[in-house]
Every structure is written in structure tokens, then in C-alpha cells.
Amino acid sequence: MLRSVYARKHHCIGLGLFSVLDAAVIFGCVSHRRDLMFYIIGGITVSVVAFFFTIKFLFELAARVVSFLQHEDRERRGERTIYDYVRGNYLDPRSCKVSWDWKDPFELFYKNGQPFPAHRPVGLRVHICHVELAIDIPVTQEVLQEPSSNVVKVAFTVRRAGRYEITIKLGGLNVAYSPYYKLFQPGMVVPSKTKIVCHFSTLVLTCGQKHTLQIVPRDEYDNPTSNSVSLIDEHNYSLSIHELGPQEEESSDVLFEKSVMSNRQTCQVFLRLTLHRRGCFHACISYQNQPISNGDFDIIVLSENEKNIVERNVSTSGVSIYFEAYLYNATSYTNTQWHLPPTHLGSSQRRPSTATEDEDEDSPSDSQTPEKVKKPKKVYCYVSPKQFSVKEFYLKIIPWRLFTFRVCPGTKFSYLGPDPVHKLLTLVVDDGIQPPVELSCKERNILAATFIRSLHKNIGGSETFQDKVNFFQRELRQVHMKRPHSKVTLKVSRHSLLESSLKATRNFSVSDWSKNFEVIFQDEEALDWGGPRREWFELICKALFDTTNQLFTRFSDNNQALVHPNPGRSPHLRLKVYEFAGRLVGKCLYESSLGGAYKQLVRARFTRSFLAQIIGLRMHYKYFETDDPEFYKSKVCFILNNDVSEMELVFAEEKYSKSGQLEKVVELVTGGAQIPVTNDNKILYLNLLAQYRLANQVREEVDHFLKGLNELVPENLLAIFDENELELLMCGTGDINVCDFKTHAVVVGGSWHFREKVMRWFWTVVSSFTQEELARLLQFTTGSSQLPPGGFAALCPSFQIIAAPTHSTLPTAHTCFNQLCLPTYDSYEEMHKMLQLAISEGCEGFGML
């Protein structure tokens, strides 16, 4: 029973097993057929895809080979093989990397990612340009000696803040993502560069009224900046004010109040100031406890009534206002027993009379006497728009003019406390040329404020040079406003330029000189669209001011010396030629005031004493230092630094002929041949010597020059400048051309490293310099910030760059020989730092000879 059951079960199992096996065999046959079809279709698909990618690879390879063969250097084409391109062993601009953290350099890579040896020629070009100003920035490239040797260090210097475009190309192809655009922000605020806008050396304020000072923060490179974490923090800007002289009365009240506001968009800071006490004060503005550039100034604080009086004084046109005063010690010279003769003043020193102030032609003397004032005497101080004069009246009706000062920035006031006799506030007047004058006056503050306001009115409301230039040009255009600037033809001969120019302008009126010259050179067909006119100005300046033509001369044989009117000119050179020279300078100043293409500079380098006479300054022995350095070193310095009691000097000057024979003895004062020079009066002797040698000998020449100049430019406009500013106005800074510099500079000595690396760095640094920095470099090396009319080619001796036997030190200079001694350096950055430091701080040291 049990067996049958088992057998039945087993049979059932067997039937089921056979059924499964049959189904598996049938399914296996069908699956084998499907796999075969899949393999066939898959193989065909893979073959097609492989063929497609092969064709694509070959086309891409061919395109790259052709492309790189077109851009690669011809010398290197033979070095490549197809195998190099197949395995990516070529320089690919798209695989190169540029880092911008200003530490990592530029890296070169093969297409396959392997480092490319940068010492091999790759045609790397880097161009950097300021987007807004279109200024190209010079760069220097250096391959770093690292194990991979695929690193190129590109160095450049950015001075102007703003957006820059940086283009990097290899073989004419841009590297990845080139060009780049980088924004260079201004640096941190530098107090020595930060300035007050519309600066005055003295402010006239009203007690209790608020006054706003506008300050422009600037960085190290003179970019307006607001990059300060605490720019508007009031504690960053400090203002110190103290009263000049003893206080009239002690007061516990607050002297002043200030507040600071800023505008980050315009990079400006506004300091609002209110003073609560009358008097004269000195103020100093500092940023983070360091004085700003022009932050030192005086302040005169008036009451409301005093302010009204000053405004009335200044607004009264053509009338001199007088004040009663007492004259104290007028000079430091010891009491002498003679009076100086009247100094013959040229037209530059004679000022027009006003309605109530005559020039006192009948006065016994027109200049001050060196006689020391023993006790205070009553005098009258006259303030007019042009001059400040001190007079004494004899018998209350006869005026005697004691002192005269010009109303100009060169006349300085010092404020002292009450005098010991009359207990009146004291004022010291000093123009740097005449002996200081000490006055005590009951209305001292009103007198000083009237002078200051008249000065501000004369110079256009600001004492900065650029503001004075703008005022000068605006007023000069106003003077000639009614004269048309139409064309007038000037036909001259190139072979006899001076004579033909004199003849062509012989009958010209002031109106004709104010017109636009259309210059035609004889036997030349060029039309004057500006070129011939500019050429004529340059050639006629050379004909007039070059010493070979004998109108002007130098005090030494050095062709870099300044030029001065020639007292020993040839007889055929009449004084009328100096009038023509004056008109030409006036013409250049007027044309420059019109701006644009009309701007003309005087191609000359005048002596400081001649410039001083143009603006009406008296002579001083210090002018010898720039005008006649040899005479200054040999005689002036010797007298200043030694005891003159045994030198047997007298107040006279011996004049010698060109052959060395004594012609005559010129007395500097009446009876000067019998007056000995002592240690007490040697300064007076040197000043009189300067007056004779620099002014009196050329009085006629200067007077005629001024006659022509003042026909076009009023003397009161010229008087707002000092002699250094006048040179900048007339002659400009003289653009220094780096290409001209590089062409004519002589490199002496040096190893391969010096000539190939250091000199390449040097020219890159010089190319990045501003005109001001180039002028400093020129002054550091030659002693003068200006080039001769012929540029670097005219320097004698030539500008020499000497390989100094030192390393990583400051450059030195030998100004007598125009030599710049340049050490070797390890990097571009080090040389840039050292050269910048030398020209900024080294004008009084660092080996200058």
C-alpha cells in the first residue's frame, strides 16, 4: 500500500520533469537565434561608431596640424612630427592656465597636460591696456627656473586705478578665456597725497559762522580713493588749532567745532569748521595723525562788523586803504652810515598808480634804507589791489615811501602778540627778498584780512598752481575777447628766419599779434593746417634763445646751463629784437590759453633771476645757485661760510674784458669803493652784487622784453606766479620721450645678467613712469628736471648708465657727468622699488656728486 503510493508520487514527479525539459529545449533554440541577431547588429553598430570617431579624430587632427603650422614659428615646424600631434605633445593655448592671485605666475602646458618648457620660444604676447584711458602698460617676462620649467612670470606696474584689458596670446591665438578684464581699485589713503581743494595759505573767516573745507583723499599714486575702512570716521581726521601770539584774554570757551562728512562716490571728504573766537590762528589737518599735503594754513577770524569793513575795502576798486601803524625793527643789518641809491626799477617793478595813491615820483627815495629803526615810528600802511606799501610823512604832508611789497603769494604775513610799547598786535611782512618789516597796528586783523582778500581776488580764489593757471588763462582770454582770432598770413624764409619774421611782423598791432598766424615758408607749397605754424614757433624760439645767436647767453660753457639776456650782444642785434622776443612769449601764453591745438610752449630754459625780473622781484644772492653755479660755489659760498674781515672786499665789482684785462670798477653803492665788506654787512653786499650782475647789466634788454610781453599779457596777471611757477607756465615740464631716452642713453660695462636682464627691467620700469617721475629721474642724474631743446641727444656728456659693482642697493648718480650708477638686482620688483626710492628721496643724497 505504501509502495503504490510512493510509485504514484514518483511517476507524477517524473512527468513534471519531462515537461520542464521539453520546454527548456524549445526556449533554448529560440534564444540562440536572438543572440546571434543581437551580436550581428551590435557588431555593425560598433563598427559604424568606431569608423565615425576615427574619421572625426583624423579630421580634427588634420585641422589642428594645419592651424598650428600656420601660427607656429617657421624654425620650429621641422621639429614636429605627426606622432607629436597624435599624442598631444604640442603647446595648446587653450590648455594654458593664468592665475590672478598676484603670486602664482603664468603656466604653459602641452595639449596632453604635461608641462611645456617655457625657455623654448613660444611667441608669448601679453598686452595690458587701461580701458577708459587707452593707456598701454609695459610688461616684462621672465622664465622661472623650476623643475617643470613651464612657468613664465609676467610683471607689470599699474599706477592708474580703473578697468584693464589683459590679452594673452600664444602664436597669435588667445589662451583660454583671454582677454581678461580686471578692475584695479585705488590704494589706501596716503596723507602726503591727500589735498584740500581750493587751498589758501590763509583763510579769512567770520566768528561763529560755519566754513566747509573740501578734501580729496588720494592713494600713493594720486588716485582719488575711498578705500579706507573708516574713511568717514571722524577720529581719522584731526584738526589742531592754536592762537598765534599771546592771547588777548584767557577764555574757557570752546575754540572751535568740527564735523566730518564724506561722499564715497565722488571720493571726497567735507570738513566743516566753526571758530568761536576772534584773532589769528594756525591750523593743521591730519589723517591718522599724519599731516595731509596742504593741511597747514593760517586763519584770521573776524567779527561781523570787521568782516563788513573788509568786504567794503576790497570792493572799493582803484582806491588804496590806509591804516595807522608803528614801524619797529625793519632789518637785521647793523646800522650803516650811508643810504642806498634809488634802485632803477624796470617796468616789471613799477606798479600803476591808484586813484588815491600816487607813485610819489618826487619822494627822496624809492627804496628802503638799510638803516636800523631804533624806536617805533608812526607810519601809514596802504593796501591797494596790487601793492602793500609803508610810508612816513614829514611835516604831515611830504610822503616818504619806506617799503613796498607786491600783493602776491610770495608776500607772507606772520602774526605776533602785542608790542611792548603801544600794546598793539604785531604783524611781520616778508617777501623773501627784502628785509622783514615789523609793524604794530590797532586794526591788524582788518589790515591783514584786506590784504589776503585782495590777494585771493587777484589770483582767482585759490593758491594752487593749477587753479592759478586756470584763472590766468581765463582772464587772458577776457583781455583779448574783443580782438578777433581770425587768420593773418605770415610769410617767412626758412634760411633767414629771424630777419624775415621781424620784417613780416614789423607793422603788426596788438590785435594782429592776437590773431591766428598762418605761416607760409617761402618756396614751399605746404598748406598751414597747424603744422607749419607749430614748426615756426619752435624754430623762432631756437633762433631767439639759442646762445649761438648771441641774444641770450649762459654764465658757463655747459650747454645745460640756463639762458640769460646777453649784455655783450653784437651791435647789429638791436633792442627791438628783445621786444619781438617778449611779444613771441606773450603770443605763446595767449595761444596756450585758447587750449587744444593752439597750445604753444616757449622752447627755452631761462635763468631764475630773469624770470624773477619778469614778475617784478628784486634780486637776491640765492639766484646765483641756479643761474651761475660756479660763481656761487667759488665766491658766494666762500663769503657766506668764512670770515670776510681779512678779504679786503669793498662794495664794488671789477669788470674785465674777454681778454682778461680790467676795464673798470663798478661801485655797487655810492662811494662803495671805500666801504669795506664786513661779517655784518656781507649779506647786503651779496644782494647788491646779485642786483648788479643779474639785473643792472641787462636792464635795457629786460625792459624791452617786458615792453613786448606786457602788450599781450598784463603784468598783474603774471604777478600771481612765482619764478618757478612762471617757468612751468611758459615752458611747461617738457615731455620726456622714453624712446628718445633709450636711443641716446649709453650703457657702460656690466655682465650678461646686467645687460640682458637688469637693463630690460630698467627700461620697463622707466616706461611705466609718469612724466613727473621721469623728470625726477632726470633731475637725480643730471641735476636738472628739464632737457635741452635737442632732447637727450643734446645732453653733454651723454646720459650714461653705469653698471655699479654693487648688488641690491640704491642707485647713485654723478650729476656732473650725467651718470646713473645702477646696481644689479635679483628681480624686477626689487629694482623697481630701489629706483623709485632713489628718485623720490635721493635728490639730496645717495651718492649724488
Image: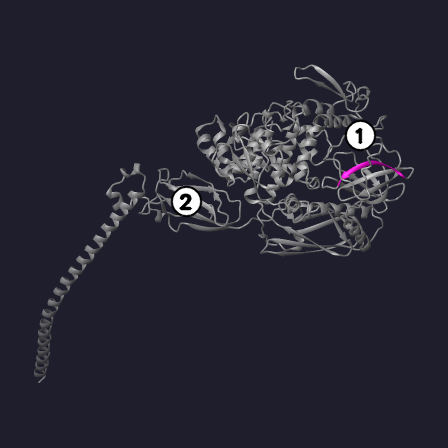
Chain-order first, disc 1 or disc 2: 2
Specify the segment rendered in magenta: 397-406
Front in this rendered view, residue 645 or 615: 615
The outermost residue toward the bottom is 1
The nearer-to-camera label among 1 and 2 is 1
What is the number of the mark on residue 613?
A: none
Q: Residue 783 lies in what quarter of the image?
A: top right
The vertical placement of 230 against 598, above or below, is below
Q: Residue 820 lies in what quarter of the image?
A: top right
Tell me the residue at 84%/51% (across/down).
250
Residue 25 appears in the figure: yes
Q: Is residue 402 magenta?
A: yes
The residue that label 1 is drawn on is 342
Disc 2 crowd rating (10 Å Cα; few below 14, some 14-19, many 20+) is many
Q: Is residue 399 magenta?
A: yes
Q: Quadrant of the N terminus?
A: bottom left
Disc 1 crowd rating (10 Å Cα; few below 14, some 14-19, many 20+) is few
The residue that label 2 is drawn on is 106
